[in-house]
Image (cartoon, helix red, strand yellow):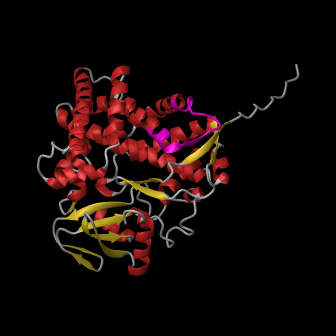
Amino acid sequence: MLSRPHGFLARCRRRYGDVFTANIAPYGRMVFLADPALIRQVFTGDTHVFHVGGVRGRVLSPLLGEHSLLLLDEDEHMRERKLMLPAFHGEALRRYPSLMEEIAEEQVSGWPVGETIALRPRMQAITLEVILRLVIGVRDTVALARLRDLLNRLLDQPTTLLFLATAANRDISWFRPWRRFLEIRAQANELIYEEIARRRADPSGDDILSLLVQASGDSLSDEELRDELMTLLIAGHETTATALAWAFERLTRHPAALARLRDGDAAYIDAVIKETLRVRPVVMEVGRDITEKVRLGEWELPAGTRVMSSIALVQRAERDWPDAHAFRPERFLDGQPAPYTWIPFGGGPRRCIGASFATTEMAAIIPVVLRHFDLVPERPESERSQTRNVTQVPARGARVVLSQRTPKPEPQGVLSAV
């Protein structure tokens, strides 16, 4: 499960069907679901019964904070979600694409032509800049550089360190790697709290932090704002960068799709994004802990069961996706998928609040890269998926060879007779 999760889960499904149990260290007994109807039951079920806590929640809490939207349950989750939702929809979202394109243009201008590069780190640089400038709204260049460095160092911390610290359930500040993590986090927190104080004094900006302060007033404390910003920084930046890397990894191995994408058809760009997230989901499953006995289909599950709605399995089911492993964006031009067969952002009241922001960002960045470069994969064979923390990343970082793109000549106009 840890080294080859896609293959392992696919074998389990072939042998046991759409519902099966696996005991996986260190998380214990899990029930995996690959049936859209059962997944819908979990996603839309009573939030008092289906919790997100558990081991994974505890592991992430030192990084994201106790008030992170990803880790909250029941009424507390709904309260913070309602306060945050306006900043990610409607007019707020329509302001961002031009700024995202501007940031991407700045970043790609320094890429080396004629060399092999890994695109995932390049995408991380772009998405981190988007988060820092559009979400937090950092303007001071010194603070921007400092926060950029601290967040990169936090992201480099292994999940095993977080698991060790939370499993110990006692102070381990004597352990040098953990003490270093605490020092980096404290420095990042100091800068984030400074930005929060600035927005409290003047919330007139259009970055997401300003919008949150405008919408919530004193309803969100400084600590709650810090935890939500850290969640957006860590979760939003990493996942979108990985999705972008997978998009280019797939496109460079499907030249017909790449050629069609260059035509700039907005519907096809959207289809490419959706097909990338279908065939290469960044997160493989969504977990819930059951607080009381529940019946799912023909199975009765006791309280304490960890239920995993498998994004990877349901999005590669041949019954819903013919030739499921093939990369064919055209399938999203023919209509909407059946309910709960495409769930890269989860679903129900816990659907990812940043889903529209992420897809808007992808739609803004992909055309910028393609305007500047032709891309050829370093190797013809596909890159396998590799587990990094809780995400599935291209094993070689989506390595491509860049060459400068020659703009097509403008069509010559016909001179009018005078």
Q: Taking 66 as reference, is 198 above or below it?
A: above
Give the residues drawn in magenta, as a range.
107-124
Count every numbered label the image shows and give the total: 0
- Quadrant where the C terminus sits is top right
Locate residue 110: give its quadrant.
Answer: top right
* Residue at left offset 60%, top offset 58%: 381
Q: Residue 283, position in %: x, y?
A: 39, 56
Q: Residue at x 31, y 22 (%)?
A: 204
Q: Residue 414 at what x, y percent from top left?
A: 84, 28
Q: Which of 398 and 336 lies nearest the eye of the viewer? A: 398
Foreground pick, 317 / 298: 317
Question: Could one spot residue 21 in this view of the protein?
Answer: yes
Residue at 39% from the left image edge and 68% from the top image edge: 36
Q: Image check: 38 left or right of 129?
A: left
Q: Residue farthest to the left?
A: 170
Q: 310 or 265, which lies in front?
A: 310
Image location of residue 392, percent across then percent down: 42, 55
Residue 410, horizontal then vertical, whole percent: 75, 31
Q: Which residue corresponds to the image point at 38% horizontal and 70% vertical from the top-left? A: 34
Left or right of residue 288: residue 293: left
The correct choice, above or below, for 2 with respect to 374 in the image is: below
Magenta region includes residue 413: no
Evaluate whether residue 220 shows in this view.
no
In which quadrant will I find the N terminus?
A: bottom left
**Is residue 122 inside the magenta stretch?**
yes
Above or below for 398 versus 326 = above
Vertical relation: 103 (above or below) 296: above
